Image (cartoon, grey):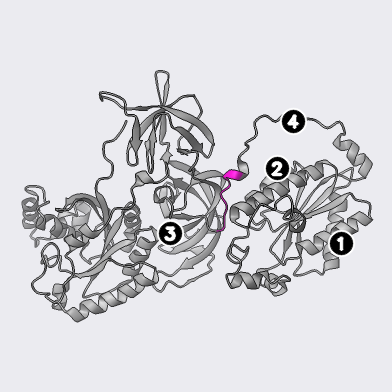
Amino acid sequence: MTSSHLWPKLRIVIVGHVDHGKSTLVGRLFHDTGSLPEGKLETIQAVCERRGMPFEWAFLMDALQAERDQGVTIDTAQIQFHTEARDYVIIDAPGHKEFLKNMVTGAASSEAALLLIDAEEGVREQSYRHGYLLHLLGVRQVAVLVNKMDLVGYSADRFGAVAEQYRGYLGSLGVEPMGFIPISAREGDNIVVRSKVMPWYQGPTVVKALDHFVSEPGQADRPLRLPIQDVYKFDQRRILAGRIESGKLAVGDTLLFSPSNKTAKIRSIEAWSVPEQPAEALAGQSVGITLDEQIFVERGEVASHADQPPIESNVFRGRLFWLGKKPLAVGNRYTLKLSTGETEVAVQSIERVIDTGDLSSGPADVVERNAVAEVVLRTRGLLALDEHRNNPATGRFVLVEDFVPVGGGIISMEGYPDQRESITRRATNITAVGHTVSREARVLRNGHKGGVLWFTGLSGAGKSTLALALEARLFAKGFHVYVLDGDNVRDGLNANLGFSPEDRAENIRRVGEVAGLFADAGFVVISSFISPYRADRERAREAAGGSFHEVYIEAPLDLCEQRDPKGLYRRARTGEIPEFTGISSPYEPPDNPDLVVRTDLLGVEECLSELAAYVERAFAPDN
């Protein structure tokens, strides 16, 4: 089940506005480099003669009958191509607006791009959109070909104007093009041989530019990622099959499977009709492996080495290109395809929609077709994933609705933690011990139930003020009550934690466990933390059993900034405090809190009365 192909070819995508000459360019490249299969040119010429139409180089690429009839490329076509320097796989992607999803498919698997612009028509809307999509999909090596120079009299001024306009746009994206090349694909100028009618251009030809592209850092040098595609049973063996997207593995390696977090050693790498079984395999190979123990692993899990695992999370940011006929909206659910896995995902929020023309952005309630947006997506269970910048192969995703791809994008975890540490239980020699003092006895002694009153909300919403005031009021009424907040846990229990997303998640995990113990001891424990992530609050709820009460201390961001008692928002706005909730880090409001206290509408005493009344009801002995 091994493959001998290790991505030896550089993958190039060719993009551009419809009719800007992509297929013509590829046909010309084929012919002028001698890469054309024997008899192919003659076949196309004969077809053109039978149809009474002039010969077109584009017909060498447009192999589909529908494309010849319509004169438009409607699908990606992959061709093997070679120069004296190396081999290539060139992907000719459609430029028409309706076929952008195929262009996305082609660009997603490419290492470099040739982007065509018609010298006569100039930079068009699709030119901007294609440039942004290349940026979105992480294609950083781009050469811009200004085509059809024969239609503008091979004018150096016209070439300069087009190049200058588009260079500025790519620069605003942070993309430095490897060069601008004036060409005529139809006439063969500057494709393989330098043009004699454009002596003012002294740069490389298209072929030379291709040969200057460099392959991405070897996928084998990245951390191991083996998404499991299927599990086969042969005799007594269970063979796990999939393609190694990055890294390498060898017999005897211990693999970690995410998100189930099971581990086992590789017993063998399976192959057929070979003198001996391979001992190792590399990125790009499709493999089948057996393990030294029969653990249950299913399609969609990702195998890695334990010291470099993927991220585990049920929420992430997606830089998304939307292709669906129906708009994407908050609350919509789709099928998420990530590596070999599929799961249901909900749109938690639309952060902003981006205008690919001028790169302006702003809030929106929906994402319309062919728009680019930054969204937050959430699943029920944990996913194994990587940030696209760290591992593109496991950092890209596709959204599907009614079995049709409707969007695709790349993953960012900005502001969100890796939840792996929060769910990992390392101690295995622990035995639960029951208390001789029952919960009922504590309720009878204290006169109230124990439980957790979990205050969540933005900084400045009033959590600490209300928590301390409520503690005093309940204590005066005879409640066993205690406040947990940053002041009394950050100096002791959590003194070793910083403020990264992972440290903040661990901070809340520990607080949740301590709060659960207080509740079990019969206390009304008031936890006052921003606790911005829903996943962390859900773990705190689990730790407290059935005695958890989520209280949303709600106030809008602008009001919290106006209050800003410690000057934290001001410092966050200036960049002095990174990862500040509400500014540079997300806050996820509760979905269905037990109580909402609006500090923007009510005074402190009114809020206290509302909170105290809730405690009297919810923590009453007979409730």
- Residue 213 visible here: yes
Image: 486 above or below 425 = below
In this picture, is 41 found above or below 373?
above
How many discs mark residues in the rendered view?
A: 4
Whether tag 3 and tag 2 are in contact, CB under 8 A, the answer is: no
Q: x%, y% of residue 12?
A: 26, 55
Disc number placed over residue 609 in the picture, else none: 1
Residue 544: numbered disc: none
In the picture, measured across the screen, residue 414 lies left or right of residue 183, that is: right
Asked if residue 417 is among those painted magenta in the image, a careful observer would answer yes
Q: Earlier in the sequence, mark 2 or mark 1?
A: 2
Which is closer to the viewer, label 1 or label 3? 1
Badge 3 is on which residue?
322
At label 1, counting other C-alpha atoms closer than 10 Å, the crowd grade (few under 14, some 14-19, many 20 or more) is few
Q: CA distance from mark 1 to mark 4?
A: 40 Å
Q: Amino acid at mark 1?
A: Ser
Q: Residue at x 74, y 30 (%)?
A: 432
